[in-house]
Image (cartoon, rainbow, N blue to C red):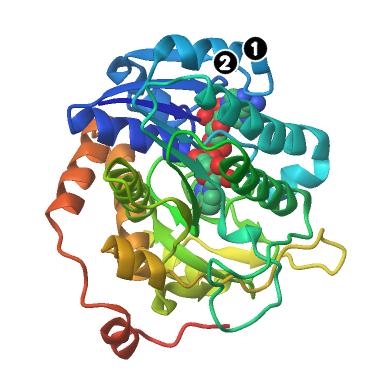
């Protein structure tokens, strides 16, 4: 199968390209340049690609041109401006990339008859946030206060409208949780910020230590995406899907920082820089992925503690000189060999109460 991944130079996209290539697929990508020190560079993901294209997804003609000439079987649209803080600093780029960029990908897919499955990636942040304890389900209202969340909610609504208005390639929307894993170098994300400061011997400041997030390992999230693609190829799966962890993995930022400090050792620490003048970010974000468990048979294999351990393990191994590609592929292989854990209720019973 020929997969086209937009955003293949980013964190999730690099893992996805490595995984698809390891499964023997042909993988092409459309993205901007990778960030310095990214997984894309460190694991030489380029060498695994059929076509590694640098195209701005806001440029509709170039996107149509690229997708029609690549003629992929599957499109997975990850490319986005994905950071909440950045979205306050540059709302225009955030909205144009996330909304118009998605429109351009949908239109290009409509013009490409080879596409048999089209997966659009949005986020848990698309839901109108009510700070509720219960996880959001797919039929809940969308919203989003900050520019990132609302731009992704717009992309989600746009995709739903497109699917109804212009029937074509089977299309699904995946709403994932807060993803962690080795090789993320984004700014203003908890784990990358912490790991950077641990390595530099600095103390990182945390803006919202009480915020609770559904933490998920990147491989669990990508496994959900791949299950969805499989379903689309089999004539199922059209619609919206939450691909998030169970409640045992809803953990306060403060606890994640404490656990990362404990796992890293060597006297590292973090400091609370919460300030009422910080731009608003949601306090509690919870996803209910029952639909994906029931209808796709997808289930997280790693709970929060293992997800954090795998992330720190990746960083330590690469720091100690192991090659990033080999470490990533060894984690992919180990992940594929795991069976799902015994479901949410068993996990809740054994997990410490870590909620804020
Ligand atoms: N990482 C998370 O915790 C998380 C959670 C939920 C949803 N998501 C979604 O998953 C997707 C991937 O996130 P990520 O963490 O890998 O982000 P990332 O920042 O690591 O990667 C973003 C990718 O998008 C590309 N891109 C950005 N603007 C572009 C443009 N104008 N034209 C072409 N390419 C462009 C970048 O080059 C990069 O390849 C995004 O859609 C994001 O909203 C991420």
User: Circle 1 sits on which residue?
Assistant: 61
Vertical side of 173 occupied by 101: above or below? above
Residue 212: x, y in percent?
58, 73
* Secondary structure found at label 1: helix
Quarter of the picture for ligand 1?
Answer: top right
Residue 150: x, y in percent?
74, 52
Q: Residues within 10 Å of mark 1 (few under 14, many from 20)?
A: few
Residue 53: x, y in percent?
48, 13
Q: Which numbered circle lies on residue 122?
A: none
The answer, for residue 323, to whether it is visible in the render is: no
Query: Horizontal placement of 265 versus 112: left or right?
Result: left
Tell me what residue is drawn at x 68 percent, y 23 percent. 58
Query: Horizontal placement of 254 versus 15: left or right?
Result: right
Task: Judge by depth and name the residue closer to the eye, 277 or 86.
Answer: 86
Q: Which numbered circle lies on residue 64?
A: 2
Vertical side of 210 occupied by 298: above or below? above
Task: Judge by depth and name the residue closer to the eye, 233 or 65.
Answer: 233
| Residues marked 2 and 1 touching at CB (< 8 Å) | yes
Residue 265: x, y in percent?
38, 62
Q: What quarter of the picture does the N terminus occupy?
A: top left
* Secondary structure found at label 2: helix
How many numbered dots are placed on residues in this image? 2
Task: Judge by depth and name the residue closer to the eye, 222 or 61.
Answer: 61
Quarter where residue 26 is shown: top left
Tell me what residue is drawn at x 74 percent, y 59 percent. 144
Q: What quarter of the picture does the C terminus occupy?
A: bottom right
Quarter where residue 108 is shown: top right
Tell me what residue is drawn at x 17 percent, y 50 percent. 336
Residue sitting at the far bottom: 349
Quarter where residue 186 is shown: top right
Q: Residues within 10 Å of mark 2 (few under 14, many from 20)?
A: many
């Amino acid at each position: 199968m020929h997969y086209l991944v937009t955003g293949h130079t980013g964190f999730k996209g690099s893992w996805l390209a490595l995984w698809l290539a390891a499964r023997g697929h042909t993988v092409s990508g459309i993205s901007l340049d990778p960030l310095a020190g990214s997984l894309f560079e460190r694991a030489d993901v380029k060498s695994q690609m059929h076509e590694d294209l640098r195209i701005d997804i806001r440029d509709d003609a170039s996107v149509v041109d690229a997708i029609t000439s690549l003629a992929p079987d599957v499109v997975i649209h990850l490319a986005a401006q994905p950071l909440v803080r950045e979205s306050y600093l540059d709302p225009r780029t955030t909205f144009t990339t996330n909304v118009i960029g998605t429109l351009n990908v949908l239109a290009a897919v409509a013009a490409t008859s080879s596409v048999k499955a089209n997966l659009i990636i949005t986020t848990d942040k698309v839901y109108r946030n009510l700070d509720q304890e219960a996880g959001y389900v797919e039929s809940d209202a969308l919203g989003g206060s900050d520019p990132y969340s609302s731009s992704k909610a717009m992309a989600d609504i746009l995709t739903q409208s497109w699917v109804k208005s212009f029937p074509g390639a089977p299309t699904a929307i995946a709403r994932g949780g807060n993803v962690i894993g080795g090789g993320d170098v984004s700014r203003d994300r908890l784990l990358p910020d912490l790991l950077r400061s641990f390595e530099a011997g600095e103390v990182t400041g945390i803006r919202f230590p009480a915020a609770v997030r559904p933490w998920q390992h990147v491989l669990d999230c990508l496994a959900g995406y791949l299950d969805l693609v499989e379903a689309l190829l089999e004539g199922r799966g059209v619609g919206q899907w939450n691909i998030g962890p169970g409640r045992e993995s809803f953990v306060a930022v403060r606890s994640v920082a404490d656990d990362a400090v404990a796992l890293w050792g060597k006297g590292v620490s973090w400091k609370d820089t919460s300030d009422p003048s910080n731009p608003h970010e949601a306090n509690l974000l919870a996803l209910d992925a029952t639909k994906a468990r029931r209808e796709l048979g997808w289930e997280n294999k790693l709970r929060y503690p293992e997800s954090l351990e795998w992330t720190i393990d990746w960083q330590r191994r690469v720091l100690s000189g192991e090659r990033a590609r080999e470490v990533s592929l060894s984690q992919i292989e180990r992940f594929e060999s795991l069976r799902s854990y015994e479901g949410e209720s068993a996990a809740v019973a054994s997990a410490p109460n870590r909620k804020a």
